Amino acid sequence: MQYKKVDMSIITRLMQIVGEKNVLTKDEEKESYSHDETLNLRRYMPEIVLKPNNRNQVRDILILANKERIPITPRGGGTGLSGGAVPLYGGILLSLERMNKILELDKENMMAVLEPGVTNGELQREVEKYELFYPVNPASLDSCTIGGNVAESAGGANAVKYGITKNYVCGLEAVLPTGKTLRAGGKILKNATNSQFIDILLGSEGTLAVITEITMKLVPRPRVKVDLIVPFDDLGGLCGCALKIINNRLLPTTIELMDRLTIKTCGEFLQKELPFSDAKAHLWIGLDGNKKEEVESMYQSIGEICLDKGALDVFVAEDRPNRDKIWQARQSIHEALVHFNPKMVGNDIVVPRSKVLSLIKGIDSLSRKHSVSFAKFGHLGDGNIHVYILQKNINDTTWEKVKSEAVQELFELTISLGGLISGEHGIGLVKKKYLSLVMSETQIELMQGVKKVFDPHNILNPGKIFDS
């Protein structure tokens, strides 16, 4: 599709909408908007960056762009890992960073109404003041936005007990390319009336509408939290341990996996020795509740299961400083791996929990076949494993071939185990060529049909999820 370029007359009209200081046109100003956190993805420079601060400005921008056939890429915090927020066709980069207000905290109904630019961490800290809790906690929580979380249907470590973003979105307001406003849901827990509009926008990656307001469900803040680090030298015991914990009706908030390569990389990056860093892998288990004795009983039962399955030890962190030390390592994994391995490719595959051991064994076989290192970590408790393929000392020519073959075979392995190619990072730009591995031609045609209904001129985030 041919798009119109952003010329001076368009720039003048856009300045009238958002104000001159909220329009970026210089390359040095736009550079940080030309990429997200996707590994080794080339830059895509927008022609212009706009920073609206209310729904009406978003509406007027969309009306203008739709009329002039100018592509628009909506953007939250730019922390995505699938190329979903890069302006593939140039045009307008619509940054929602100034729409960052928590509009209402309703303690009685346990709901928050907010703009899309509020960061996940900010929401968590604010609701804690009211003894409430927003449980969805991506590793990038201090920089990712709630709007971006909704657009990706993001998950996080607490998904074992609390679920993911889609379990907390009760209402949405979004602006269509025509400028019309779509509202669905509200501060309600049940909705058999218009919830389909919420469902269709969740995970749509900015391709259907621009989200301008979100109503999120909150839960009571748990009074007691405990974290466990459990090292293993036997992956069969580790995976069996996770399954037994859940099957015994013990429900942790978190069951995370870190393999030896990831543990050592994080320790080196943080310049400190992590406990049992020579173990083959660690389980990181989070627990919460309202009574100390109940949480203690739970972690004692879990500890017994872990030791019975061959754990080398069980470290218990009950106070906030020690728990923060544990999570500092978990939240630094991506940054640590990037720091020491600037050329690599990351994936967030998901399989049934019972198939994680088979997945890990298959990945180890791929590692031997291609003579390449794989770092494995992530959400063992829900089967969503992050797999980073590291270039290390492989020359660039060989790396391109190895990378392509390894990713293809990793996805084929995942699908053979009943899994999917993305659990939480989305399809975006980098995974769209693999979509046909997991979706039929009919499914893709239906998705394209939905896109055409919402965005007939294909101006919203074109080239993402599937080719335009």
Image (cartoon, grey):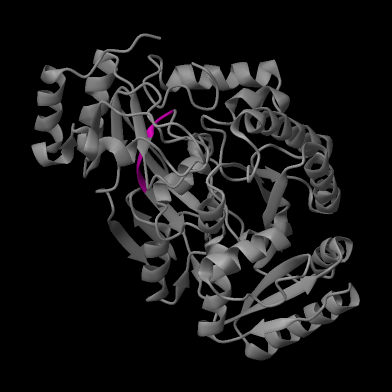
* 77 and 453: which is toward the camera: 77
Residue at image coords 53%, 63%? 331
Q: Where on the picture, by quarter, is residue 268?
A: bottom right
Residue at image coords 48%, 50%? 169
* 329 and 389: which is toward the camera: 389
Q: Is residue 186 visible?
A: no
Task: Decide if residue 127 is on the left or right side of residue 198.
Answer: left
**Quadrant of the snapshot with the N terminus:** top left
- In the rendered image, the residue lying farthest to the top is 2
Q: Can residue 211 be found in the magenta stretch?
A: yes
Q: Can residue 216 be found in the magenta stretch?
A: no
Q: Where on the picture, by quarter, is residue 17?
A: top left
Task: Decide if residue 125 is on the left or right side of residue 430.
Answer: left
Residue at image coords 52%, 41%? 39
| Count of marks, rendered view | 0
300 up-or-down from 209: above or below: below
- Where in the figure is residue 366, as x and y percent of width and height? 80, 40
- Where in the figure is residue 81, as x and y percent of width and height? 51, 42
Which residues, given as a range, are shown in magenta? 208-213
Most common SS among magenta residues: strand
